[in-house]
């Protein structure tokens, strides 16, 4: 009875306030969705992807161990990675709206897409760990978009079924780093060298546990490298990476 009342309320809300496309604002039939043109422009990454960074590979379906050229040359320290969208067009617009436009509603759709990508890891009872913001940056933005994504992912049916939980403060920033925008790969690594650490009070809970690191976008992957090293030092593992969008290698 309670569920049916919620459904009635949802239908009434949709009738009174017709839903808008998450990107362009045009009317759509389903709440927290994309209109036809924005969906067509969205570059969703399929099954043919790099096992480590989630970037799209040529072909219909990649083998579980297939890596892109960048990951072959410099293998990431985590065990596997997945991404939902290319960081272009609709994917880039959604990430920027979430990060800088206070569009927390985007998490409703993005979390569902991300949960689908992570199903193969759920049997290991992983903890979700979002990439943290420095306190000063958090005060400026008022929320951590990676933590919001992680919390919404935990509410998806797949994650609820496995009772997966989120540990939003598992990691913290030792220092405030400069913006990564415009930096090359080596400069990004230097900027984030030893910038993240494991929160001491969570060390026992993370020891020997599988972890899914959550972030909004992966460019060079330097932030995720730093987070993975901090978790490894604390004895966590295996470690997986799940992001909403993956930038092109040129980015």
Image: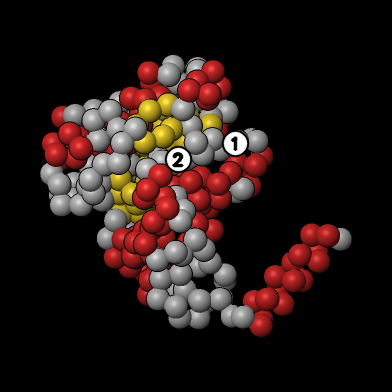
For residue 10, the mark is none
Question: Where does residue 14 sit, x and y in percent of width and height?
Answer: 64, 76
The image shows residue 226, relative to residue 250, as above or below, that is: above
Residue 116 makes an appearance in the image: no
Give the residue pinned by disc 1. 165
Foreground of the two, 120 or 139: 139
Mark 2 packing: few (<14 Cα in 10 Å), some, or many (20+)? many
For residue 130, the mark is 2
The image shows residue 67, relative to residue 237, as above or below, that is: below
Identify the residue at horizontal 58%, vertical 44% (top origin). Answer: 154
Which residue sits furthest right?
A: 1
Task: Tally the marks.
Answer: 2
Question: Where does residue 124 sit, x and y in percent of width and height?
Answer: 54, 26
First of labels 2, 1 by sequence position = 2
Identify the residue at horizontal 56%, vertical 38% (top origin). Answer: 166
| Secondary structure beneath label 2 | strand
Residue 23 makes an appearance in the image: yes
């Amino acid at each position: 009875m309670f569920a049916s009342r919620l459904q009635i309320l949802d239908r009434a809300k949709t009738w009174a306030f017709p839903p808008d496309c998450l990107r362009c604002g045009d009317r759509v039939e389903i709440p927290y969705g994309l209109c036809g043109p924005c969906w067509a422009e969205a570059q969703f990454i399929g099954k043919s992807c790099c096992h480590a960074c989630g970037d799209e590979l040529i072909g219909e379906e990649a083998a579980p161990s297939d890596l892109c050229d960048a990951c072959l040359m410099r293998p990431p320290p985590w065990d596997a990675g997945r991404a939902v969208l290319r960081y272009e067009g609709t994917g880039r617009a959604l990430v920027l709206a979430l990060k800088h436009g206070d569009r927390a509603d985007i998490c409703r759709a993005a979390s569902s897409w991300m949960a689908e990508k992570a199903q193969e890891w759920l049997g290991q009872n992983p903890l979700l760990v979002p990439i943290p913001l420095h306190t000063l940056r958090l005060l400026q933005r008022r929320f951590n978009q990676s933590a919001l994504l992680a919390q919404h992912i935990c509410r998806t049916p797949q994650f609820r079924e496995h009772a997966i939980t989120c540990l939003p403060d598992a990691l913290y920033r030792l220092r405030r780093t400069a913006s990564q925008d415009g930096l090359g790969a080596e400069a990004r690594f230097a900027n984030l060298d030893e910038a993240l650490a494991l929160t001491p009070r969570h060390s026992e809970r993370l020891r020997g546990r599988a972890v899914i690191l959550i972030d909004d976008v992966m460019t060079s992957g330097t932030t995720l490298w730093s987070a993975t090293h901090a978790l490894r030092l604390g004895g966590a593992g295996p470690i997986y990476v799940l992001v909403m969008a993956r930038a092109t290698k040129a980015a």
